[in-house]
Image: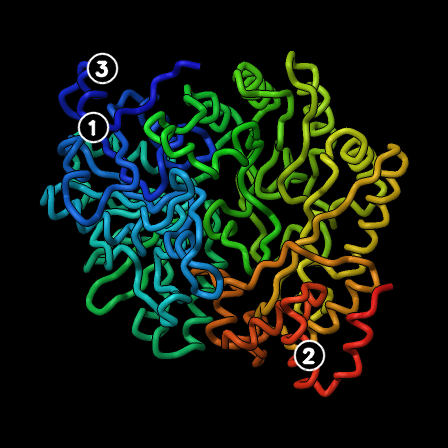
Amino acid sequence: MNRKFLPISQDDMKSRGWDELDVILVSGDAYVDHPSYAAAVIGRVLEGAGYRVGIIAQPNCDKLDDFKKLGRPKLFFGVTAGNLDSMVANYTANKKPRSADDYSPGGKTALRPDRAIMVYTNKIRQCFPGTAVVIGGLEASLRRLAHYDYWSDKVRRSILLDSKADILVYGMGERQILEIAARVKNGIDVKSIRDIPGTSIISNKIEGIKNYTKLPSFEDVSANKDKFIEALKIIYSEADPFRGKTMLQKHADRYVIQYPPAIPHTTKELDNIYDLDYARRWHPVYDKDGGVPGFESVRFSVTSHRGCAGECSFCSLYMHQGRIVHSRSAGSILREIGKIAEDVNFRGTITDIGGPTVNLYMSECRRWKNGGTCAAKRCLMPSKCESLELGYKEAIKLWSDALKIPGVKHVFVGSGIRYDLLTGRVSDAYLEALCRDHVSGQLKVAPEHCDAGILKLMNKPSFDVYESFRDRFDHFSQRAGKRQYLVNYIISAHPGATLESELDLALKLKSLHIYPEQIQDYLPLPMTVSSCMYYTEKDFFTGKLIHVAKLGRERKLHRALIQYKNPENRKYVIEALRSLKKIELAKELFTKR
């Protein structure tokens, strides 16, 4: 593959005969030209529309040279922190600096600043006063309105105000960025753009805005936790591209105006995005560092769809990609696999064909195309809605066709799977094909907990549903003559969890001979339901007070109870059991069965 990268230097621009660029993208990630990397996707989409695009990846913020190296763009700078919020990328759930950064060359840390969008935008303003700045990506998307920030432990105002950007793109931003570029190219001042779905702006005037709802102000939500809950409930209910209203939130004497979400892409539009001419590797400037570690996990994988109807309380996907699932065609996916098979480093294994929830590929609801999602009920909870049709037949055929591509020996499912959609007879053919041909030996699932109350707060199915799936997975694996295992993801210290409930979880898992290694200490992500519960210490759905483990010591005890087999945790388990006055259970936990 000798596809050209987007320019990262003046020499690159000269080689194309360009003396200036239309759009310059500044990213907190290393430049990997692959459809799993947001800056690469936005860059290629703009390029495909005829714009001259360059990329400044991980600029050195100690001086201004990196920000100046491509000159002033004709239209605007596009700024993103990268595929993750910069605070998530830089710190663990316990606020410790991370030891590695998978999105940086060689896994090096400290190559992206904290609160990267604010820092980058400030530097651009210093270098090019008056130039338009558009911000987007996950960091912008989840901080577009007043939000709780775990790292400073306070409610922060919209990142639009703190970054002083001109316009914010939230969600998957291809539609929005093309519309902004077209308007600015046609001479419209970016500061006068006021009506693009999937964007937010700042204004001190709200005259002429129709079909809107006012949120409690920043001042109200930062002073009153009940107002914070009220605001998020409105945001949550209006997060629909068809029925959602424009939202106004006052910050001092100005308003943050959020327009309804962008309409999801059609299958053809999504195909066009993934069919673009990506180089499908990291930029050669990183070769000396050994490349970009995070790329290895997606190098031979394919994204099949966007959106997730699951609405897990702790997950940011609902607020970013939305609840409506939109899928690529099988033809587009197979074309991408064909390109992967041409890679000289490909050894025959497609590591994943998936998305936010792998078995929602090709899911459809008759409401989604014109009416949006239901306001009063959910797609999957407490059980799957009858109107939601699953694309299992299409998925099975896709897997089969992928294996027919020359050079492809294995096609595995590496993304997380929604196990509650695999417990009925209608899923037999899907689960049988999955277990027979498409599990690499381990399958990722996320029971998260066993306590009914905590699972309800998480908006996750009950544990007996997981147990039913576990039996079926074992059955179909045995039928295929294979010994395969579930990788069970668990969250410790989620709002509502107590030492008592974590002990119950440990005992339950031990009775099932499950000793989880994939434990995530709960991390409050901005604008999620669980983050709201963490901050307010109230059940988002009922308003009742709940226990929240906030102190580092208590969080450590929560994790230790679940991972009691780890010798390093033994003293913490003893401490937790003494605190619960249940020290007699130490023998039961530490005795092998």
Q: Earlier in the sequence, mark 3 or mark 2?
A: 3
Residue 529 appearing in the image: yes
Label for residue 234? Answer: none
Is disc 2 placed on a helix, strand or loop?
Answer: helix
Would you name the residue on which mark 3 appears?
A: 16
Residue that sits furthest to the bottom in the current view: 581
Residue 208 appearing in the image: no
Would you name the residue on which mark 1 appears?
A: 22
Tag 1 and tag 2, C-beta contact below 8 Å: no
Q: Is residue 353 left or right of residue 528?
A: right
Which image quarter is the C terminus in?
Answer: bottom right
Label for residue 574? Answer: 2
Q: Between marks 1 and 3, how big is the CA–CA gap?
A: 14 Å
x, y (%) of residue 393? 74, 29
- The three-letter amino acid code for the residue at tag 1 is Asp
Q: Nearer the viewer, residue 344 or 173?
A: 344
x, y (%) of residue 531? 49, 66
Q: Is residue 26 above or below residue 74?
A: below
Q: Between marks 3 and 2, how big is the CA–CA gap?
A: 66 Å
Q: Earlier in the sequence, mark 1 or mark 2?
A: 1
Q: Nearer the viewer, residue 551 or 259?
A: 551
- The three-letter amino acid code for the residue at tag 2 is Ile
Q: Nearer the viewer, mark 1 or mark 3?
A: 3
Q: Is residue 29 left or right of residue 351?
A: left
Q: Between marks 1 and 2, how big is the CA–CA gap?
A: 62 Å
Q: Residue at x 64, y 33 (%)?
A: 362
Residue that sits furthest to the left in the current view: 129
Residue that sits furthest to the front in the current view: 567
Is disc 3 placed on a helix, strand or loop?
Answer: loop
